[in-house]
Image (cartoon, rainbow, N blue to C red):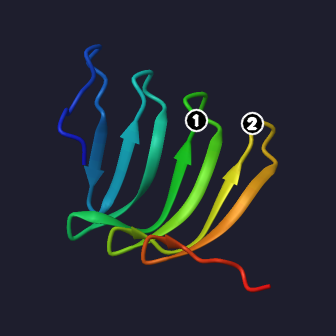
Amino acid sequence: MVANKQYANGQKTYELVGNRLTYYFKNGKVKAEGYYENDQMEGEWKFYRESGQLWQVGNFKNGKKDGTWIRYDKNNMLEYSENFKDDKKVKKKE
């Protein structure tokens, strides 16, 4: 989690409710959201642009990227999809 609990304008930077962690932009819109267990990101996380538009969806295992990560462009079209194992990109077999 980030050290600062709020931005200069008073907007909170994050909120932890149970095991659900949400990060916020300075404008109050959601920046990222997902599960937080044992002091690390876990499971599926969603990341947003400051406009509120979905940017990325990915998974964490023990705080490291693991599984499929998908990124969308500003037109909501799939930009790319990558796979990770233990925080390292898995190269596709040719």
88 relative to 22, above or below:
below
Element type at marker 1?
A: loop
Residue wearing tag 1: 49
Q: Residue 41 falls in which quadrant of the image?
A: bottom left
Disc 2 to disc 1, how far (Cα)? 9 Å
Q: Which residue is drawn at 50% across and 69% down?
A: 59
Q: In this view, does 7 lie to the left or right of 59?
A: left
Is residue 10 depicted above or below 3 in this figure? above
Badge 2 vs badge 1, beta-carbon distance below 8 Å: yes
Looking at the image, the residue that sits furthest to the top is 9
Q: How crowded is mark 1: few (under 14 residues within 10 Å), some or many (20 or more)?
A: some
Which amino acid is tagged 2? Answer: Lys
Q: Position of residue 33 (x, y in %)?
A: 44, 51
Crowding near pointer 2: few (<14 within 10 Å), some, many (20+)? few
Q: Which residue lies furthest to the front in this view?
A: 94
Q: Is mark 2 on a helix, strand or loop?
A: loop
Residue under pointer 2: 74
Residue 67: x and y in percent read 55, 76
- So how many labels did they put on this image? 2
Q: Residue furthest bottom?
A: 93
